[in-house]
Amino acid sequence: MLSFIHRTPFFRLLAPLIAGILAFMLMPNVPQAVLLTLLLFALSFIFISFLPANAKNQFAFRWVFGVGISFLLLVTGYYLSLRANSASEFHFTEEKNLYLVELTGAPLAKRNSYKIQAKVLGYQQDTSEFKADNSKVILYLQKNDSAAALLYGDRILVQAQMQPPQAPLNPDAFDFGAYLRRQGVAATAYVQAERWQRAGQNNNFSLMRLADRCQKYLLNIYRSLGITGDEFAIVAALTLGYTDDIAPELTDAYSASGAIHILSVSGLHVAIVYGFLLFVMNIFLKNKPWARFIKSLIIIVALWFYAFITGLSPSVMRAAFMCSIVALSMSLGRKAEIYNSIFLSAFVLLLINPNNLFNIGFQLSYAAVLSIVIFAVPSYKLLNTANKLIVFAADIVIVSFAAQLGTAPFTIYYFHTFPAWFLLTNIVAIPLSTIIIYVSISALALSSVTVLSGILAGALKLLLVALNNFIHFVFMLPMSVLNVSLNFEQMWLIVFALVLCCVFYYSKKYLPLILALCCILFALLLNLGIKYQTLISQKFVVYSAQRNTHVSFIEGNKNTVFTTDSTDIERIASNYWDNNKLAMPDFIGENGFFSDGFVEFYGKKFYILTNDFFRRRTSNAVPFAVDYLVIGALQKPQVEQLLTCLLPKKVIICDGVSAYYSAQTEKVCADRNIPVHNIGTEGALTVDL
């Protein structure tokens, strides 16, 4: 282990930088005085390390220099995180103001709107002067032809009510608000069609705008070659990182079969492009005295331009950075050290944006590449055959298994699924996608040659159809997706177990193996603890949903659900159900458990209002007592009339009730001392019975 640390200086630099980023996440309000003290401490240690006059004493004091650098990087990680998160702080008023924004991406079509990423150039509140700004925002423009025609760099004036990115309102839901803040987004807003107008364009040179135009130009070449439908969606994602046209059903099929990674431009794609460029360069620049340097320079420029075209995701930047190091080493006649290259790329990406550490793509990318280097490379030595076909198939199996092993804890934690047939999928999908990328590059390069481009386009269509058909075949196999879940602690216990297994493999000492087994045992004990807590629980949950009403009645691991849309509730609550080891939901209708909106569960009476049954009805009799009145989404309750018929101990207002009716309900209930839980502002309600 010490030998590994000595051989990888960038690991020693990366560790304190990550520690500083994590320190900010855990303690975001450390006083500046503490940071300055740590900084002075770090600089003092670095200064002291240079005081000894002779080389022998300097060598003896090298640990002092190491401590100083470590503390300096710790403070650097904290400060960079502080600065990055300050940029995404919400500082607008939650009122309608006038904003001048510039598009930093092409419009993305949603069901009822176009999503645009933009930069605020300035804004005006009431009659005040126009204030300059530089915040990133996401706007949802009402769908129309004008919104669809917007381009990268266009400037528009919008009248909008900015909102800070919202925290999740449902238990165990993905925190989209935190995700946006880590992407630097300070606010979001919906803009009606009559509330915005185009105000010119930024004509200054922008590399990102150039990359966006290049991507659109290449996409239009695919269209001109007659590639349409699912085939266009796959080739656009596979080669250019353009995923807007992929149907949800196709995404589900690729995800369930274990091939979703080929639709996200990453290290595999960059490596294929690198290999293609190297092959071409070796043809045209062979045996030239200056060829090595020129070859490397062209490859590096081409790789980074490809990275820009495909959107500069962390996985692409990591791969482009590593391939650039390999190309640079090749030009200098040196061999790149693989671990140093990996840690150097992570170090640079985190200096650029410390929030990359929390990016799922960043985590999966580095987990995959480290796992391949650690597990796959030694496994190649076990191959003892000269048969190239067997070696090729074995390489794919080994790499796929190693990558899946490293990423499994993260994919299970984030997505709650595991593709059972991933080896079968990758044996076919990886070589097929490699051929598709090579044919695609050739078709794009020769698009002006009618005969050749036509032949290549025909071959490309056949290959894409074959890939999609194979993915659907695997998707339809029994048990193609295993539904499993891990909580945060279990995920890291398994990651630590894998790391300790690596230490055992290289050190041949049994202590790391014993500790790895302890980590796995502890993860299993946590799983048993969750199951036990679920078995002894009785509770109900009212979920947050904009257009539907969902209530779970949970008894042990039995999950009985009232819902107005079963597809919507599965999307909203599946993570919560998986994390609590609940059985598949039993959707209730008009039966003994539920009748005319009334439910009785563990001695508690509920009424779930999802229709106009009580609208304009009053009663002079004693109101029917219920423990909980749930006012469903999209309802317009006349609360005073409703309370002549029902007498609740608590009122729950669902998220889809308008602000006007929510306010009216809260006012009437306050006058009658009836507590209210507004899910739209307070989030989902969970009550243990």
Image: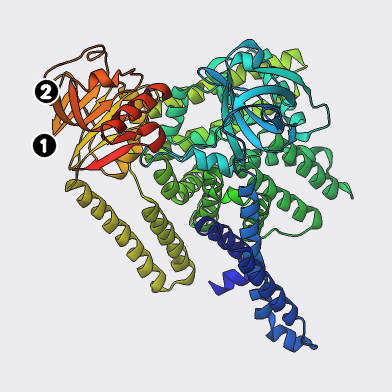
Which residue is nearer to you in this view: 524 or 129? 129
Q: In the image, is 181 to the left or to the right of 422? A: right
Q: Which residue is drawn at 18% across and 29% down?
A: 606
Q: Residue at x 23, y 24 (%)?
A: 608
Under circle 2, the secondary element is: loop
Question: Would you name the residue on which mark 2 appears?
Answer: 622
Distance CA(mark 2)–CA(mark 1): 21 Å
Question: Would you name the residue on which mark 1 appears?
Answer: 603
Label 2 is placed on what type of residue?
A: Val
Which residue is nearer to you in this view: 576 or 370? 576
Which residue is nearer to you in this view: 420 or 63? 63
Quadrant of the image containing the C terminus: top left
Q: Which residue lies furthest to the front in this view?
A: 671
Neighbours of disc 2 within 10 Å: few (<14), some (14-19), many (20+)? few
Q: Which is more foreground, mark 2 or mark 1?
A: 2
Q: Which of marks 2 and 1 is nearer the N terminus?
A: 1
In this orientation, does residue 547 appear? yes
Dividing the picture into quadrants, the one containing residue 436 is: top right
